[in-house]
Image (tube, coloured by chain):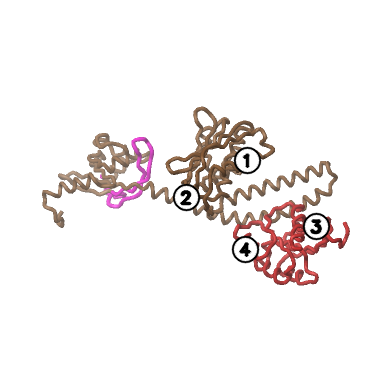
Amino acid sequence: MIPNSPHTLRVLVVDDEPLIRWSLAETLAERGHIVTEAADAAETRLAVAKTPAPDVVLLDFRLPDSNDLGLLRAIRHDAPHSQIILMTAHGTPEMTRDALALGAYRVVSKPFAVQELAALVSEAHAAAR
Amino acid sequence: MPTSRLAHGETRGILEAIFESAVDGIIVIDAGARVEAFNPGAERLFGYTEEEVVGQNVNLLMPSPYREEHDQYVARYRSTGEKRIIGIGREVMGRRKDGSTFPLHLSVGEMRVGGEPKFTGILHDLTARVQLEVQLREQAALTRLGEMAAVVAHEVKNPLTGIRGAIQVIGGRLPPGSKDAAIAKEIVSRIDALNDLMKDLLLFARPPQPHKSPIDMLSLARTVADLVSGDPSLHALTIDVTGSSIPVNADPELLKIVVHNLLLNAAHAIQGQGHIRVTVASLDGRCRIDIADNGPGIPPHVREKLFTPFFTTKSRGTGLGLSTARRFLEAHEGTIVVTCPPEGGTTVTLELPSSQVVA
């Protein structure tokens, strides 16, 4: 692991389930990324407003204080250069379509393989450049 | 008939014509419950001819226990005058000549002919209405199940995702090839099985809203067959897809799930070894798909329960595959039938309305 190598990304992991945050944070850190965590929409808004903004946000669709695409829209506004990967336990084709139209890079269904999601983080960042 | 505009001579003819032409069944019995008249409407309802019924006790047309109890009802009315159905009418069960039963509404009127009491029953078939009521009840139950499943799915999948992720991280730190690492992998596969159960439940419970588009049934069957044949655990299996290109207007994703489920069932029936034949053909403006295996077939007592949700004979099965398939077919005005031909094996037949070919 080489801190701050060209492959090091700032990743914000947003989920109210601590085990999901922990497993994603561990996997991403092992790959050399710098991870911050948020458990609800309010923490997320604070985290994306900081400079520098995260390169990639892994965003849970349903949070204690958010259950629609409003938070995705807010992140796009506050941190327009951050790539967003939406995670959902119970998505519909309509929700996926709307999220992609709002600028999400990808919508992934829970449960997922953590390694695959970590690879998708790098892919999302590469696609943004 | 004081208010009738008919001349006296015409009245009898008109009444006879009504009796003969009525859609509903009309039956006249005497005080001893013997049938005196049985109109064509009643013949259609029960499958008996008038000659077979006239002179017989009307309880011939009733299933047990009413058949045995009817004489007591008549005797009680004659001794007490207490009316339970006469002048009122109610829903009862009828028994056809072939022994099958059906729901009907019976209203009974009392009259006197030459001083003798007689009773006229008018019978209206309720089969269609009762079937509709059953369908509506099932639909309402499924809607409730769907709402519940959607909530449960989220509440279960979220922690499952956390557990799966954490076990993967911890498992990745265990010595490769160790017993502990193998157990960690086993935990992940158990979690995946639980997730599959949630997926099956959601598919079954969520009302299918087909996004229809013109598709070719033959190429859809081939695509799914290739997918199943490509499964490494089914390498000893061959699936032959034959027939002609039939256009249908349907949701390809829903039909892929149906065909996939049926091919996997067939593959399990022949324990992953042997042949499955898929035939796509056109029949009376409908598209017919036969999926036939040469396995051991299905005993009749199991066959009658095949479409019951959660009924399964597999050690690891949800019992939702066939009931989901039927729901999806019904959403396309289609049908699904399972037969076991005398020469052996099992054939599942799907039928869908085929769409017009646009030249």
Membership of B82 in magenta stretch: yes
The chain letter under disc 4 is A
Circles 1 and 4 on the same chain:
no
Mark whose residue sits in front, 1 or 3: 1
Secondary element type, mark 3: helix
Residue B355: x and y, percent? 47, 48
The region drawn magenta spans: B78-107
Q: Which residue is mark 4?
A: A98
Amino acid type indicated by mark 1: Asp
- For the residues bearing labels 1 and 4, Cβ distance under 8 angstroms: no
Membership of A27 in magenta stretch: no
Residue A6: x and y, percent? 84, 61
- Who's the residue at 47% across and 40% down the image? B282
User: Residue B335 or B5: which is nearer the viewer?
Assistant: B335
Alpha carbon of mark 2 to alpha carbon of mark 4: how far?
33 Å
Q: Which residue is mark 2?
A: B358
Alpha carbon of mark 1 to alpha carbon of mark 3: how far?
36 Å
The chain letter under disc 2 is B
Alpha carbon of mark 3 to alpha carbon of mark 4: how far?
27 Å
The single residue placed furthest to the front in the displayed view is B359
User: Residue B2 or B153: which is nearer the viewer?
Assistant: B153
- Who's the residue at 80% across and 70% down the image? A52
The answer to which quarter of the image holds residue A106 is bottom right
Alpha carbon of mark 2 to alpha carbon of mark 3: how far?
53 Å
- For the residues bearing labels 3 and 4, Cβ distance under 8 angstroms: no
Few, some or many residues within 10 Å of mark 4 (<14, 14–19, 20+): few
